[in-house]
Amino acid sequence: MAKLVFGMNQSLDGYVDHQAFAPGPALFRHFIDHVRNLSGIVYGRRLYEVMRYWDEDHADWEPAGGDFAAAWRYQPKWVVSRSLKSVGPNATLVGDDFEPVIRELKARLVGEIGVGGPDLARSLSDLGLIDEYRLYLHPVVLGRGKPLFAGPRPRLRLVASDRIDEDVIRLTYVPA
């Protein structure tokens, strides 16, 4: 049985903004290795649209960009969306009735299934489906934006903390 792992970069004040801070080389390498080892990824629409950047090669990429793109393209993806009509390569569109699909993925796959997007993570948390939360805390204060947790969460228990990059700490929690 696979476990659902929600991981997200966030500011010190709890906001998510993919334009406000980018991973340094060590954190980017960490994400390449992480994505390579997943059994698949479940995305909300907004984050999936951001990540579609990796579907096409870009001439200005450093070698690590190509490594991440290859790892990302390889992974099967399930995109939970009411508004999208189609998704890209190696992706499956999942509509409103996503709970049975996610439960089936957890039962059928082994290893870790990544969860991308705070809104989707909230819905999955409300259903008791998230097994682990990995918060990548960046030394940035945004003062505004999309909150990582937009509403009550289940009580969490810290199980690990790791310095991933010179400035980034990963906090790993499980439901208490």
Image (cartoon, helix red, strand yellow):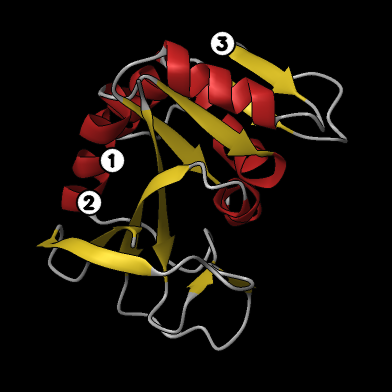
Where does residue 154 sit, x and y in percent of width and height? Answer: 48, 65
On screen, residue 150 above or below 60: below
Q: Is residue 150 left or right of residue 131?
A: right
Q: Amino acid at mark 1?
A: Phe
The first of marks 1 and 3 along the sequence is: 1
Residue at image position (26%, 34%) is: 34
Q: Disc 1 designates what residue?
A: 31
Secondary structure beneath label 3 = loop
Judge from the rendering whether residue 52 lies leftward or rightward of residue 68; answer left or right.
right
Task: Give the residue drawn at x 33%, y 62%.
Answer: 176
Residue 19 in picture, x, y percent from top left: 53, 62
**C-alpha distance separating marks 3 and 2:** 25 Å
Q: Residues within 10 Å of mark 1 (few under 14, many from 20)?
A: some
Residue 56 visible in the current orientation:
no
Position of residue 128 measured from the top left corner of the image (x, y, whole percent):
53, 47
Picture layout, residue 161 above or below residue 53: below
Q: From the viewer's side, name the closer residue of 59 and 162.
A: 162
In the image, what residue occupies the spot 42% across and 24% down? Answer: 72
Label 3 or label 2, whichever lies nearer to me, is: 3
Asked if marks 2 and 1 touch (Cβ < 8 Å), the reply is yes
Q: CA distance from mark 1 to mark 3?
A: 19 Å
What label does residue 27 carry, if any? 2
